[in-house]
Amino acid sequence: MSKFYKKIFLIFFVFISASNLYSQIDLGISAVKNGDYLRAVNILKPLVNQEDSYDGYYYYGLALLNTGSATTAEEFLNKALKKDDEGVGALTALGDLYSKKKNYDKANSYYKKALKVEPENVDVLLAKAKNLTIAGKIDDALPVLALAKSLKNDDPKVYVGLGDAYYFRKAFRPAEENYKAALKLKQNNPAAHFGLGQIHFREKDFTEALDQYNEAIKDNANYAPAYLEKGRLLYFSDKYPEALTAFESYSKLQPGSVDGQTYIAKVKYGQKKYDEAQTILEKVIKDNPKEDISSAYKYLAYVYNDKEDYDKALEYFSKVPKSLFDTEDYIKLAQIYYNKKDFDNAYKNFDEAMVSDSTDNTIFYYLGIAQFNQKKYENAIESFDRSIRLGTKQLAAYVYKGLSFYSLQKYEDALKAFDAANQVDNAYVASWLWKARSEVAMDKIDDARISYKRVIELDPNNESAKEDMEILDKK
């Protein structure tokens, strides 16, 4: 082959290679724009350093951010800014990244830079408003959202942003109105359905919440937050296999995030598979030294509490910033202190749980148990009453309430509590057993015999009922 033809062939080969590179880059960018972030990462990962462009680095960084790889995302978004220090997309994405890390002031500094370049960019305004909302600065977020609305009042994302602001303010009706307004503008809107799901979850309407999370997933099968919240809801409903499936889906969409694996471990914990949970969590900690692994520390504390290693549980809880505590974490910490007989710290954490969410019935259920075990029966009755009013599904709350009255020798009140439990579930053995004992204490022997027979009908091997019946027969 002559030198001329070799040169032509080489030029042609380079041209084809470059064309293929740009074609693949464009394919990856399209995947990002379509919200298929995992596919985008797989396409762009081997190419972006070859192309060495702002767009390549920015879209790859954005894809990494949306699949949970915050540390690597930060690296590539900064590479994008080296190519163009006024790149609005990269500046906004870095703002989003720091907002996810709860570094709200640093996040705001990036939004400020982006808005200096494009003062009327609605997407940046919405990102800034979301950051302010999550930071609890709702009064600062609302004017930003008002500006975004004045610029583009037909953008469904604006109404989602307004819905989020009102949701975080716990103004659920205005939040609902805005999410529904977003759905009128765009019917297949996962963020709006997700927002409605969050409202229903907070209002304890779990069936409707689950429906809305499923709608969000139907709108966009890659919408990771819906899988996470769906899994959490199912976990709290003790539907562990379904919760596990949801968390596994989330983990596949967010392979760079530790949250998926930690929640999978939490399901194992709920199933009392403590060793499996511990193994997963220890691997998360080992494999992610540069990431925020607070959630892994938190659930290791849960595991050690149930293994009755309370000092180890407190050690892991101490690694978790209080800003990341949920209501259930305060409850768990209260239980740990209670088990250590550190009652002052136990009740202090129950108080913290109430500050976190005074409508959570589980706080008052577990507080009532602590009070009952300390023979603070009057206080326990108040706590169980509140748990019941807030909609607890724990039949034991009724029974503990009845036992508190029984311990105070207020047998008629005890009987009412046990009857209330039986109205909820006519096959709950404990309530029938203590109903019988209350009837005996009130000298209602015939009624007691009927109640004891019901216990034995439900649980033929119940020795307590048989022994009580033998005593009655000797009278």
Image (cartoon, rainbow, N blue to C red):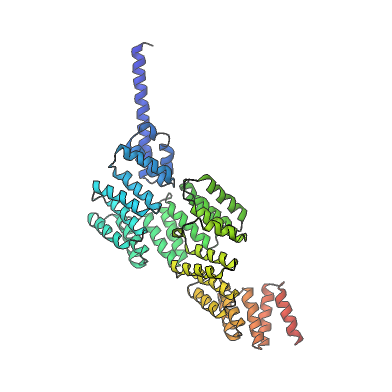
Q: At which x and y percent is residue 58?
A: 35, 41
Number of marks in picture: 0
Residue ID at (35%, 41%): 78
In the picture shown, does residue 153 fall above or below 81? below
Residue ID at (57%, 79%): 377
Residue ID at (32%, 40%): 81
Picture quarter containing residue 399? bottom right
- Is residue 31 visible in the rendered image? The answer is no
The residue furthest top is 2
Task: Give the quadrant of the C terminus.
Answer: bottom right
In the picture shown, does residue 283 fall above or below 214? above
Q: At which x and y percent is residue 411?
A: 61, 85
Task: Give the quadrant of the N terminus.
Answer: top left
Q: Nearer the viewer, residue 347 or 186?
A: 347
Q: Nearer the viewer, residue 238 or 61?
A: 61
Q: Nearer the viewer, residue 270 or 301?
A: 301
Q: Nearer the viewer, residue 65 or 154?
A: 65
- Is residue 1 visible in the rendered image? The answer is yes
Is 81 positioned to the left or the right of 220 in the image? left
Q: At which x and y percent is residue 331?
A: 52, 66
Q: At which x and y percent is residue 254?
A: 46, 48
Picture quarter containing residue 343? bottom right
